[in-house]
Image (cartoon, coloured by chain):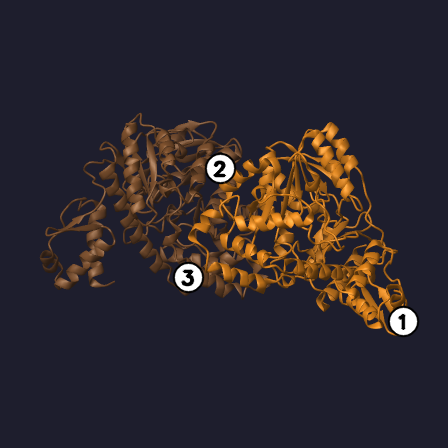
Chain colours: A orange, B brown
Amino acid sequence: MKRYEAIAELIAADIRSGQLPPGTRLPSIRKVMAQHRVSPATAFQAYYRLEERGLVRARERSGYYVAGLGAASQPEPAHVAQPMLSSTVDVSELVFSVLGAVKDRDILPLGSAFPSPRLFPLPRLARSLTATARFIDPQDTVASLPPGNPALRQQIALRYLGQGLSVPSEQIIITNGALEALNLCLAAVAKPGDLVAIESPGFYAASQALERLGMRALEIPVHPKEGLDLETLAAALETHPVKACWFMTSFQNPMGVSMPEARKRELVALLARHEIPLIEDDVYGELYFGQHPPLPAKAFDKQGLVMHCSSFSKTLAPGYRIGWVAPGRYAREIERLKLMTTLSASVPAQVAIADYLHKGGYDKHLRKLRHALEGQLLQLGEALVQHFPADIRVSRPSGGYFLWVEFPAGFDTLRLHALAAEAGIGIAPGPIFSASHQYRHCLRLNYGSPWSPAFAEGMAKLGQLAKQLL
Amino acid sequence: MKRYEAIAELIAADIRSGQLPPGTRLPSIRKVMAQHRVSPATAFQAYYRLEERGLVRARERSGYYVAGLGAASQPEPAHVAQPMLSSTVDVSELVFSVLGAVKDRDILPLGSAFPSPRLFPLPRLARSLTATARFIDPQDTVASLPPGNPALRQQIALRYLGQGLSVPSEQIIITNGALEALNLCLAAVAKPGDLVAIESPGFYAASQALERLGMRALEIPVHPKEGLDLETLAAALETHPVKACWFMTSFQNPMGVSMPEARKRELVALLARHEIPLIEDDVYGELYFGQHPPLPAKAFDKQGLVMHCSSFSKTLAPGYRIGWVAPGRYAREIERLKLMTTLSASVPAQVAIADYLHKGGYDKHLRKLRHALEGQLLQLGEALVQHFPADIRVSRPSGGYFLWVEFPAGFDTLRLHALAAEAGIGIAPGPIFSASHQYRHCLRLNYGSPWSPAFAEGMAKLGQLAKQLL
């Protein structure tokens, strides 16, 4: 890392931690020069870099200021520590209408579950596809049957190793995206009628899977700062026959919050005491804004109870549909379920991603992607301060591309969703993130697209609509 | 079609129908010249073509003879018209051991479920992959979400049209191979505990799916000449609460038999009277040996009760994992299940196959493939006559790449399977094709690989082992 980049990174960390809150004036160039013993050019480059990443703004004649959410006016969302038992789960109708909007090019994708595909190195991936397609040995088709293409599994094992986890390639099963991995895990460890702990608010695919498989949901609240509410979970496990847990431990969808490492360790210990398997959804784990990747709960798993699911869909190759699971003690069952339901993941996609990873450049792309997302978060945050009612609460994601907005009680985001749709703006209303239809006063915004005048206009319009509804 | 090809096709049809049984001497060249009013060169070319396709053999100084199964010595399999009710289904262990052998390059793939990938135009497909990968619009990722890539669905609709079926592209949903399509159909129309009619012997994926979803199987026998035993099905529907049927109507796996069109029409009418949905597995439909494709049951469906499932895995692109379903009235439910379980099929694979189909050449490839398979069937049949016990019965497939061999009662193909595996030969023993573990005296052979000395030796060895076990 170059000197100016290192300085920019130090300042970025202070911005992230809140030590330099939004609106603060940065130290003068002179101070930076003295503090870090660098030339004026280097100090300027550090600030240019921060400006380029969207973290600071230059104001004419008065220096650089921290961009951002305006933490003072917008507190974090509230927390209610109470589990919710829902006997039947039925959120699909709403989810499908929100998902449907994504296909409409004329809808501003603030409600989308995906980052903009423009952030991905599609041409370089295409080169890998091209380079490998011609040489696919007919036998590769058979060799890529579950558990999956050996070269790809090796590359994934290497990435685990880089994070400090030892997950040998033989313990990795390739799937059609993380979604299939998660669904296979659930089918492997729970039966119709079983009780499964999920997050609230949480990823709707979990409630949908329970609905589809006739299982029951126990919703554990997610704390806006600490992630999953461990105390509520611990109490619930004493009184409820929970068969499995399905949690997103880093950059949780929809709140964007991560469990601190110590809490992840506690979670794993708690579940080990009860011998309850954890389906760990970690698809956003690589999208951290800091300097170091957060460890997944899997890192603390000694018993093989954690099934770690991830994919390349949110970080590299959205349409390739390549994900994986490191399923611990459930490997055999999951490999068989995969064979029985969809046989294998697409071979050209597996081979191309293996080639791309082998050739290198993934880490460089990820760094660029993380910087882009962090800058976009600040842009969206500023638009919130500028256009939205003053009494909203907003989550503080440290990774991923989702922001959670809480309006005062009684506000109806389903009505806002309908009005916004008419104005060509997609949003994800709160109730789709709850098996028991809570969070009607909340919504999720997606900052996974490069900022543009269309987003600025859309946020202004959305804020105006929200004020009308207040 | 050229004159000599037309003459060859006429003779091939007579061989197929049994009018020219195996071992028969073909008419002399002089007779062919007179009958068809052609030159000696054309008559010779017709016979060369038949020889090239493996349908006839030249014997020195005595002319051309029909190759083939030796129908006289090997009657067709026996038929027992009785439904079998099995409350629990459990065939998986056995299936996985047979499937596992496929990944071993040193095992002769007579037990494989796949045709040899060497029969497919992989280089031409790779060119389509290469040509399209560079131009995948980021938006394509979203546009290819279920129901799937619009250009691909249009190409599939065109192929239906070519077969005389009107299935608009809006009624087609792209899946991860036909296996996912079949599983989604089943989940859409039946619940845990429900009774589902499947074939006996039948494709093990059906019993596995019932096992996985906690459903019960009603096994309807398959007649070696007529396919599914309609009379037994009709009687069973009067007394059993069947919720859905899952049948392979053309070139059935494992017998290779097809239902005549009139029987398919009857089947659809029968199910319409009972309002029972049919999951029609038609993955081998394009692999017919005659001049015209067999119509699927879907062609006679007026009520939208037939869910027609197929794929490109057996005909073009084995590893791409692209299949589809034309689900009639169940479209909405299946599209949603797809979104909830695996989201979407791999986009580069969808786009590449659409491009390949658009550029043309698929029909030419299919003709070549059909000729290759028919020739390989005769090779395998001759090896059976030469090396196997004389009292076996053998099915007469008119398409696909599976042959069903029935030994005398009491013969144990599970033991043969174990001995063959030791000798490096894979076979598919009968019990994996039955939820109630019948057919222990039967086995399925795969003639989907180009004939080679290894296959000749393997069949000789297999016959020797079988004789030892008799």
> Residue B146: where, in percent of width, then height?
55, 53
In the displayed structure, A319 sits above or below A195; it is: below
Q: Kindly identify which chain the residue marked by label 2 belongs to.
A: B
Label 1 environment density (alpha carbons within 10 Å; few <14, some 14–19, many ≥20)? few
| Displayed quadrant of residue A240 | top right
Mark sitting on residue A62: 1
- Kind of residue sitting beneath label 1: Ser
* SS type, badge 1: loop
**Which is more toward the observer, B249 or B350?**
B350
Q: Which residue is mark 2?
A: B209
**Cα–Cα span, label 1 and label 2:** 69 Å
Q: Which residue is mark 3?
A: B124
- Kind of residue sitting beneath label 3: Arg
Callouts 1 and 2 on one subunit = no
Q: Tell me: B348 left or right of B199.
A: right
> Residue B259: where, in percent of width, then height?
32, 42
* SS type, badge 2: helix
Label 2 environment density (alpha carbons within 10 Å; few <14, some 14–19, many ≥20)? many
Image quarter where the C terminus of chain B lies is: top left
Mark 2–mark 3 CB contact (< 8 Å): no
**Cα–Cα span, label 2 and label 3:** 35 Å
* SS type, badge 3: helix
- Kind of residue sitting beneath label 2: Ala
In the displayed structure, B320 sits above or below B69; it is: below
> Residue A146: where, in percent of width, then height?
51, 44
| Front: mark 1 or 2 | 1
Q: Tell me: B83 left or right of A103.
A: left
**Residue ranking furthest to the front:** A37
**Which is more toward the observer, A425 or B131?**
B131
